[in-house]
Amino acid sequence: MSDLLGIGYSGLKAYSRALSTIGDNIANAQTPGYARRRLEMMEAVGGGNSIFYRGNTNPGGVDIRGLDRSVDAWLIEDSRLTSGDAERAATKLDWLGKVEGALSDETNGIKTGLTNLYTTADQLTSDPSNRTLRAQFLQSADDIASGFRTAANELDKMGEGIEGAAASEVDTFNANLGALEQINIGLRKARPGSTNEASLLDERDRLLDKLSSQAGVSATFDTNGAVTLRAAGSGDLLVGGGVVNPISVTAAADGRLSYSVGGSPLAISTGSLAGLAEGANHVADQRAALDTMATGFATQLNAAHQAGIDADGNPGQPLFTGTSAATLTAATLAPDQVAVADASGGNGNMLALGAMRGANDPEAHWSGHMASQAQTVASARAQDAAAATRADASAAARDGVSQVDLDKEAAELLRFQQAYSAAARTIQVARETMQTLLSSL
């Protein structure tokens, strides 16, 4: 194709395609997962030339080699790894923060109830026969029991919430696995270097990004770009060879989550699914700790109250019943049944109860537990901030290669518009030259 018309035609075709590619880049500048495309062109082989020899004065126009996506495989992989860590940390922090809210005094009033109980006991030491103070003492006990039940109920609902979130996330993960296999089918049929192939590759990468943010996965690619996906670490096949192996989630009686694929246990250490499992573990630990504190608290205060004597000279009755935080209930006692006195005096039992206040009393245990919970949340928050920073840096490095730069696209647009005009002018010159030759005959 060494004639002027052929050269001009090849230029029009190539530069028209280049302008269309730039238009796609500009239109998709804000589209998630879109990688900048560039049309690859090469000098066409002119008449008298071959792929082994080209003359210096025999131009042949331009050929289109195909579309090239601006991607860096290493940066993409690094971005996916850091994204999985960031999602795990963020999901875990979210649920730990909800646990902290459920255990806070604003939600259940346990700390306030404990403080009021000991404060009222101190006041009864100076006014043992005051029925109002005795009623306040019993009300504080009821507030504490109610607070434990509230906290237990909140944690129970939280466990159910995590289980539901995990089931929904697993459904999304499996749907993405199925969509990825459909992309594989399309890639095996797509023409290399075509716009369709580039679009399929963009969607493939978007799905891999999402799957990586949900769980640790490892991807390998064939010559068509079709992916074989395995679970990171265990190597269990998720997608490949026309097969899709969905994963499943199971919640234990205490709410702890476990994942499996093909009936075999699947360890997930990164992504939102790992964060949900860690959140479920924390909730289960807190439920167990709450039950332990509730029963220990009831045992300790029951023993202290039963060591005293009430206003009628009878031995003190238990203040609480129940075997867990969810079943802890204040006993139905009358004000005169508050055991203020003991063998040593009319206020001796309240003096003894007040003396319990210290390192081993229920109030101190609860404060220490809340301090430990706050420290756990603070640690999770620091991990989340660090993981988010790493993920942002990795994403920025990846975008530096793949993201569309509108200023650059504007410059390329002008360049190819001028090239298109030059190709059109070449055809016009060929036409004018032919008319001149024909007119001179």
Image (tube, helix red, strand yellow):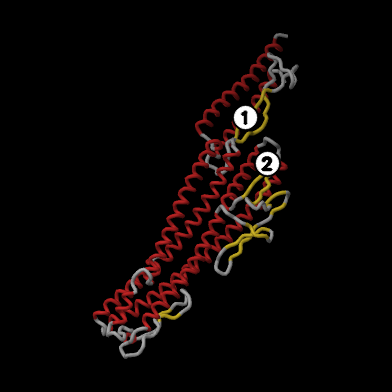
How far apart marks 1 and 2 lie (CA) works out to 27 Å
Quarter placement of the N terminus: top right
Residue sitting at the far top? 440
Could you tell which of marks 1 and 2 lies nearer the N-terminus?
A: 1
Residue underneath mark 2: 225
Q: Is residue 226 above or below residue 109?
A: above
Q: Residues within 10 Å of mark 2 (few under 14, many from 20)?
A: some
Residue type at mark 2 is Gly
Question: In the drawing, does residue 147 fall left or right of residue 127?
Answer: right
**Does residue 195 lie above or below 315 as drawn?**
above
Q: Position of residue 25 (x, y in %)?
A: 56, 36
Q: Position of residue 206 (x, y in %)?
A: 59, 46
Q: Viewer-proximal residue, 371 or 22?
A: 371
Q: Locate residue 215 relative to residue 10 in the image: left or right.
A: left
Task: Note whether 129 is above or below 189 in the view shown.
Answer: below
Near mark 1 (Cα within 10 A), the count class, few <14, some 14-19 or many ≥20, is some
